[in-house]
Every structure is written in C-alpha cells, then in structure tokens.
Amino acid sequence: MKFSTLMKAALMAAGLATLPFGAGAQTLKKVADSNKITVSYREASVPFSYLIGSTKAVGFSVDLTEAIIDDVRKKLKKPALDVAYMPVTSQNRIPLLVNGTYDLECGSTTNNSARGKDVAFAINHFYTGTRLLTKKTSGVKNYADLAKKTVASTTGTTNAQVIRKYSAEKNLDMQLILGKDHDDSLLLVESDRALAFAMDDILLFGLMANSKNPASLQVVGDSLQVEPYACMLRKDDPEFKKLVDGTITRLMKSGEFATMYAKWFESPIVPKGTNLALPMSTQLKDNLKALSDKPAL
C-alpha cells in the first residue's frame, strides 16, 4: 500500500479527513491570520523531545522549535504570538501535519525520500542508525542472535521497516511486535515480551538512561544504516521552509547549535542527571558547513 493511501486511511480513522489544509498552503499566513502557531512534541524521544512531569516537554528539538518560533514572531511582528503545543506519535505525526492540525514538527523524524512525497524537511540536524537495545543477560550481541526471536520496534517508524527487511534478507525469521510509542517498545523488553528493541541508537541510549534499571540494559549491534533527522513542515510552502532553514543556518553558523548540542548530548540532562556523553558525529559536523537537507534513500 502506498504511503499516501496509508495517510488517507489514518486521517479517516482519526476523523480528520474533513479538515484538509492542502498542498501549497502558506503556514505563515495561517499563523498570522489566527495569531497562533501550533507545534508538536514527542513524549518519549530522549534527548530530542520528551516529557518531564505530565505536560512539560524538554529536549534538543524543543529548544530548536523555540528558536524557530522566535523567528516567526520577528518575521510576523507578533511578539505576543500564541503558541500551542500538541503531542504526536510516530504514526500520526505526518497526517496531522499535512491536514493543518499543527504547523511544525522538530522531534526525531527521519528525513527520507518516501516521506518527502508528502511533507518537506528542513536542514538536517542529526544523524543516527538502527541498533538494538537488550538486557545484558539476553546473550544478544548482534542481529544473528535474534533468529526466530521476538523483536520490538515502534509503530510508524523507519526502523520497523529496516529490521523487517533485514530479517527477510538474512532469513532470520524474526518475530516483530510493535509498541505504540518508544516507552511501550522499551517495556516489551523490560517485561521479557521481546528480546530486543530495534530503534535509532541515540533514542535507545536516551531511553536506557531514563529507564527503571539502566544498569541492566545495553545497546548492541551494527548500525544498519545512517539516517538524518530534520524538522518537518508542509510541502510546497517555500516561505516557511526558508524561515525554518534560516533559523537552523543561523544557529549552526553562530555556534549556538553546538552549544545546544553540548547541553543535551554531552552534559547531565533531566530528570536523572544522566550524561549521554555522545560527541557530535562526523556527518553532523560536516553538515554544519554543508547545511544540507538531503534525505536518506
């Protein structure tokens, strides 16, 4: 089934098919007319966008979102612009953006060619690859150890597609089960309903750091592919893309982006004060100069 068909089905299921926003719709005009911008956050994408407490979202991507909102205020000359925050999941983030329910997603979304048929992406701001989170007692060191075993991933992610394809190509006959979000997928491993959780390595490190028993878990396995993360916006809206790209360019060139990176990836982070101790990758360092929005295949 094509992604566009899946998206229409998701809109129908959510009762949102009657609220089309349309290709070519201008986000800045929409925001100016309503004096309101709606941005999304993720509830469990540590350290990009995650909840502390019941309603407060924090993270690297949240800081990036706030910088973009500031530039929207300046562009529209609306210092008192109303900002609404709404949670999204891997499954609903694209249809809800396309139909105009919200206006911008900076979370942990892979910029790839398939998604580029329905949405647009800003300059890439992170690079990651699929690996495995498992218990230290599992005996799992790499993908071959998961032959005929149950493996978790998260609904609506590229990782679920990657691990399914890898299993088929290597004749591993993995039994894939999908959590509704990353916390749910982690729980599948913690409760022994899955032997491993396949996801972007940085998200696995973040989830492990904030889990109930971090010392019992480990991230293992080769990185199956390198994928860029980027802020997601509606397609055919060059004015808004120019603004978002402009914010990211300014942050990257001024050194503010590197400071934000150090805050979330190389320093203690809330709520437990864990330091992920993850230096900037070669791909990301290169993109601070290239400023590319090139998608993964």
Image: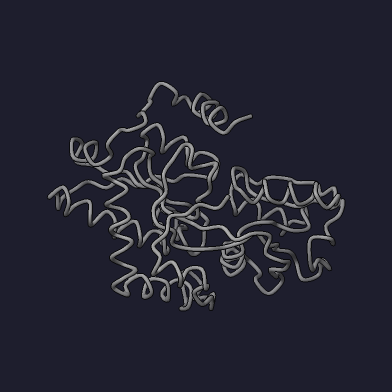
The N terminus is located in which quarter?
A: top right
In the rendered image, the vertical position of residue 199 relative to residue 140, given as above or below? above
Q: Position of residue 124 (x, y in %)?
A: 44, 58
In the rendered image, the vertical position of residue 2 relative to residue 77, given as above or below? above
Q: Position of residue 266 (x, y in %)?
A: 48, 78
Q: Is residue 138 left or right of residue 187?
A: right
Residue in front for this viewpoint, 26 or 203 = 26
* Residue at 64% over, 59% down: 225
Residue at the extreme left: 77
Residue at the extreme top: 18
* Residue at 80% over, 49% down: 169
* Residue at 31% over, 45% down: 84
Q: How is the image coloured?
A: one colour
Residue at the extreme front: 290
Residue in front for this viewpoint, 89 or 99 = 99
Q: Position of residue 207 (x, y in %)?
A: 59, 63
Residue in front for this viewpoint, 84 or 104 = 104
Q: Position of residue 18 (x, y in %)?
A: 40, 21
* Residue at 24% over, 42% down: 28
